[in-house]
Image (cartoon, coloured by chain):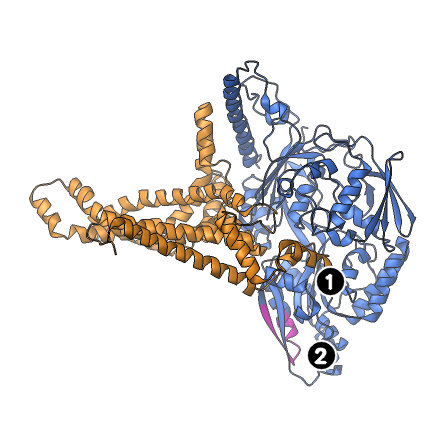
Chain colours: A orange, B blue
């Protein structure tokens, strides 16, 4: 199978998965107990008012009519209107998306930046004290609930030490760079870093620990291969052997794991955004659930599904590119 | 305690944003050949929200957008207000969330206002007069302008009332229930007045209008779409919105052309020059924010954080009534003996000590002590297990094994589940009673409770707040009238009393009838009466604020406690 056909097939599967997600999500709103019109109405609302709100929101239409309306909207790129805010779901998600992407990317960057050196150091110091420290630390990192870790970090840094803010997002990265380039003032970048560091570390801790373990295991496996012994016999420097040969070859499985963990990263971001009041898509989702704001629930979940499906397609494709032994099947 | 970090930070942010905008403006000016250096931002100050607009108050670092040194206003008093959720819209008629009301209270105004003592004060109506059981005349205050410069007219009042009350008039307002009976409008332009007429006598109309219905500009609303109105504000209040993101952040600064409400302060203006309302959903983080000096007023403090907040903590009494509701038409709650037995079996004092440090006001009726209609002769049911068992033995269910499900929402109020489980345990001290606690998702339980009576659970725990200040306008009709949206019983005597109170034209008469109804409700015990819950906020040493019992917040009433201003 050619690369193009392989990519097209994977993408086709992805579209099918997304359609299924939309259908399932739409079904859930009819099974889930509770009436959004009642939640929107004031506490003293009469049944007459609640009925009017239902009518106004189109909730009295038959299910299939609501479904086809929603699908027609999706094809036009319209995710509907939020029951609660009365504004476009797409606009709200687009407005919040940069914050979530920044958080996810920052957490991933921190994870990769820490885990690869730790994994290599651990592998090259197998069974000595350094290895033990790294291994135990990564076990603790994998086991620590990020919700709890976030609260502890807030107690330690902003409250006890008086450094770093408790949360929030004063600037987007784009906004901060715009200010830097326009005025030459770096304080916006500093503010951005100060605000993102605790949530990103909290979100990234699990991945750092996981990737450290995987890097260590991958490196140990590669370092035991014959080609490494041959390289050493040829007198190639240890640094070159470690970083050019062994590490490079152990990275492919890491890539797969990173892709597969996107869903978990998004799930983690939902929790982290609550703890650090980071104004991302995760908070939109949680609030939408609380208010039975179905258009917003569907919009945010669809976006999540899109991110997971897209990441997996990319991983499949890049894995095939990175490892020529993988056939396009 | 340090002055708010986040305040400084946000101030920095706004200064930097202005610098950015200035850079862009200079670039545009350069491209268009405009070398005059006039600020395009200043020209754009039309009072609309959702757009960062520069004012003198913004220039806190002594530098304006063009880099020119200007004098710093030393009278600045910017504060930060932390809530559990944010405002969801800027349309004052198209929501029903408490945080949105709090934000809007600084931006929009009503005809009348209920003060902290429950008294009605004039606001946009300088005077009002009941002409007959159907009609009330309001004289509209002159010289009041909206933030966009439009002058307030009686036509704006008519338009605002119609927009809320009439489904066919633009939006279906979630707030419409109290105002749907207003059907007649008579404007007298010479007197600058409007007469509102209800289709049937409504003695509570004035109080309802003092509890809500913000006045909007007809011209402004008609010239903006529904979606635009959700993100732009134009009220007559003392603050204008400068930044807004749904359920996240709401920033407003003092409106320089405010008409000056005499009740507010001696000068009629608030001391606060700018406030930022930020949504922080996690309760532990909210408390940490207060401790880190990032928040001047922090709302919805959880009991778990009371100790660590120390002197910052302020507990205040609210009119939020908490109860266990029993469906009086079904077994075993159709027996008044069972209902009363349950009230005697609950040890309120112990629960109060355990969960509220003894700060809750124990209830024997739903009407709070500071409301018109509270019956001061009614005491809470004392804890008396013998009496409970005696009553149970007199009931038709004395020899039955009573198995009940007690529904409670989880996460709506502090210690929800713990309190419910404790009550269930106390009820099980009655030998033939077994109670299983059913944890319910807040959204699903809440929407069930406000639906038809058949769909409601037979036994559940809930609470009700609100700001009517008068028994009949708030808790009695909704919760105990046979047709009330929150009722679980159809008691003829109570319904008749409530109907009588609704027709009584004087407040004294209504108070007497309400007290009588409260006594009937106490005696027939359709609820396990628990308490009026205290609430907790954290206040920094920069501010002084007296919270309202209805848990609403008014940034215009926050005072500067720094001492040197």
Dot 1 or dot 2: first in sequence order is 2
Residue B365 screen position, x and y as percent: 77, 63
- Residue at 81%, 64% in the rendered image: B518
The answer to whether B138 appears left or right of B300 in the picture is right
Q: Mark 2 points at which residue?
A: B389
- Residue at 71%, 37% in the rendered image: B235
- Which quadrant does the N terminus of chain B fall into? top right
- Checking the image for residue B485, the label placed there is 1
Residue A56: image quadrant is bottom right
Residue A59: image quadrant is bottom right
The answer to whether B522 appears left or right of B508 in the picture is left
Closer to the camera, A287 or B102?
A: A287
Can residue B364 be seen in the rendering of this structure?
no
Closer to the camera, A166 or A184?
A: A184
The part of the chain drawn in magenta is B424-438
- Which quadrant does the C terminus of chain B fall into? top right
Residue A3 screen position, x and y as percent: 26, 49
Label 1 Cα crowd, 10 Å radius (few <14 / some 14-19 / many 20+): many
The answer to whether B88 appears left or right of A154 in the picture is right
Can residue B405 be seen in the rendering of this structure?
yes
Residue extending farthest right: B132
- From what the image shows, is residue A54 above or below residue A156? below
Residue extending farthest bottom: B399
Residue A17 screen position, x and y as percent: 40, 57
In terms of secondary structure, where does tag 1 sit?
Answer: loop
- From what the image shows, is residue A8 above or below residue B393? above
């Amino acid at each position: 199978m050619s690369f193009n056909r392989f990519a097209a097939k994977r993408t086709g599967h992805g579209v099918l998965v997304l359609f299924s997600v939309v259908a399932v999500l739409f079904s859930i709103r009819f099974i889930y107990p509770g009436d959004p019109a009642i939640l929107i109405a004031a506490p003293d609302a009469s049944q007459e008012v609640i009925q009017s709100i239902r009518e106004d929101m189109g909730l009295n239409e038959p299910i299939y009519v609501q479904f086809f309306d929603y699908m027609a909207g999706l094809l036009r790129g319209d995710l509907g209107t939020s029951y609660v805010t009365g504004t476009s779901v797409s606009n709200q998600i687009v407005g919040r998306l940069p914050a979530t992407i920044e958080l996810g990317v920052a957490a991933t960057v921190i994870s990769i930046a820490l885990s690869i050196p730790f994994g290599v150091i651990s592998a090259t110091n197998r069974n000595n004290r350094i290895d033990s420290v790294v291994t135990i630390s990564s076990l603790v990192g994998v086991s620590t609930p990020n919700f709890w870790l976030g609260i502890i970090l807030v107690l330690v840094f902003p409250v006890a030490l008086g450094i770093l803010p408790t949360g929030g997002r004063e600037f987007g990265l784009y906004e901060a760079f715009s200010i830097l380039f326009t005025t030459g003032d770096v304080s916006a970048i500093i503010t951005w870093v100060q605000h993102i560091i605790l949530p990103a570390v909290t979100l990234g801790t699990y991945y750092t620990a996981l990737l450290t373990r995987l890097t260590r295991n991958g490196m140990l496996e590669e370092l035991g291969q014959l080609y490494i012994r041959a390289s050493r016999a040829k007198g190639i420097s240890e640094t070159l052997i470690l970083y050019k040969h062994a590490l490079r070859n152990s990275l492919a499985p890491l890539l797969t794991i990173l892709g597969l963990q996107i869903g978990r990263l998004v799930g983690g971001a939902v929790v982290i955004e609550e703890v650090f009041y980071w104004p991302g898509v995760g908070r939109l989702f949680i609030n939408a659930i609380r208010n039975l704001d179905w258009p917003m629930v569907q919009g945010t979940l669809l976006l999540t599904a899109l991110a997971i499906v897209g990441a997996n397609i990319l991983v499949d494709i890049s894995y095939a590119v990175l490892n020529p032994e993988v056939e396009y099947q | 305690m340090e002055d708010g970090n986040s305040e400084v930070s946000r101030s920095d942010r706004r200064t930097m944003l202005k610098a950015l905008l200035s850079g862009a403006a200079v670039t545009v000016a350069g491209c268009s050949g405009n070398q005059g250096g006039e600020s395009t931002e200043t020209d754009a100050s039309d009072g609309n929200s959702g757009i960062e607009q520069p004012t003198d108050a913004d220039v806190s670092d002594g530098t304006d957008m063009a880099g020119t040194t200007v004098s710093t206003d030393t009278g600045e008093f910017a504060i930060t207000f932390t809530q559990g959720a944010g405002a969801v819209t800027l349309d004052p008629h198209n929501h029903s969330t408490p945080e949105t009301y709090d934000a809007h209270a600084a931006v929009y105004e009503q005809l009348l206002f209920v003060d902290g003592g429950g008294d009605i004060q004039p606001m946009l109506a300088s005077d009002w007069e009941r002409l007959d059981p159907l009609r009330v005349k309001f004289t509209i205050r002159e010289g009041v302008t909206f933030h966009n410069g439009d002058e307030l007219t009686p036509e704006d009042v008519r338009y605002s009332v119609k927009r809320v009350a009439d489904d066919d008039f633009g939006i279906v307002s979630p707030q419409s229930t109290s105002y749907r009976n207003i059907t007649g409008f008579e404007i007298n332009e010479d007197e600058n007045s409007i007469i509102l007429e209800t289709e049937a006598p409504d003695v509570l109309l004035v109080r309802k209008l003092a509890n809500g219905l913000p006045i909007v500009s007809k011209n402004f609303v008609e010239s903006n779409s529904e979606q635009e109105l959700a993100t732009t504000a134009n009220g007559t209040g003392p603050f204008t919105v400068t930044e807004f993101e749904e359920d996240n952040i709401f920033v407003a600064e003092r409106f320089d052309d405010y008409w000056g409400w005499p009740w507010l302060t001696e000068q009629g203006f608030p001391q606060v020059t700018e406030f930022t309302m930020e949504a922080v959903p996690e309760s532990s983080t909210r408390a940490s924010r207060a401790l880190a000096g990032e928040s001047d007023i922090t709302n919805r403090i959880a009991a778990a954080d009371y100790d660590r907040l120390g002197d910052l903590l302020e507990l205040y009494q609210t009119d939020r009534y908490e109860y266990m509701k029993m469906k009086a038409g079904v077994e075993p709650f159709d027996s008044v003996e069972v209902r009363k037995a349950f009230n005697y079996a609950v040890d309120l004092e112990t629960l109060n000590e355990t969960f509220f440090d003894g700060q809750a006001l124990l209830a024997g009726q739903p009407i709070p002590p500071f409301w018109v209609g509270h019956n001061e002769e009614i005491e809470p049911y004392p804890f008396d297990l013998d009496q409970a068992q005696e009553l149970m033995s007199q009931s038709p269910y004395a020899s039955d094994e009573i198995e009940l499900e007690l529904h409670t929402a989880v996460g709506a109020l502090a210690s929800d589940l713990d309190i419910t489980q404790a009550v269930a345990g106390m009820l099980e001290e009655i030998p033939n009673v077994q109670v299983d606690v059913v944890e319910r998702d807040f959204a699903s339980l809440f929407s069930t409770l406000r639906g038809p009576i058949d769909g409601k659970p037979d036994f559940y725990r809930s609470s009700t707040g609100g700001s009517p200040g008068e028994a009949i306008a708030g808790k009695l009709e909704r919760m105990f009238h046979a047709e009330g949206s929150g009722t679980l019983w159809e008691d003829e005597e109570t319904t008749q009393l409530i109907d009588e109170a609704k027709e009584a034209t004087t407040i004294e008469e209504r108070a007497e009838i309400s007290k009588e109804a409260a006594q009937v409700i106490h005696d027939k015990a359709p609820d396990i009466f628990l308490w009026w819950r205290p609430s907790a906020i954290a206040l920094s040493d920069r501010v002084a604020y007296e919270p309202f019992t209805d848990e609403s917040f008014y940034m215009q009433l926050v005072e500067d406690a720094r001492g040197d201003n």
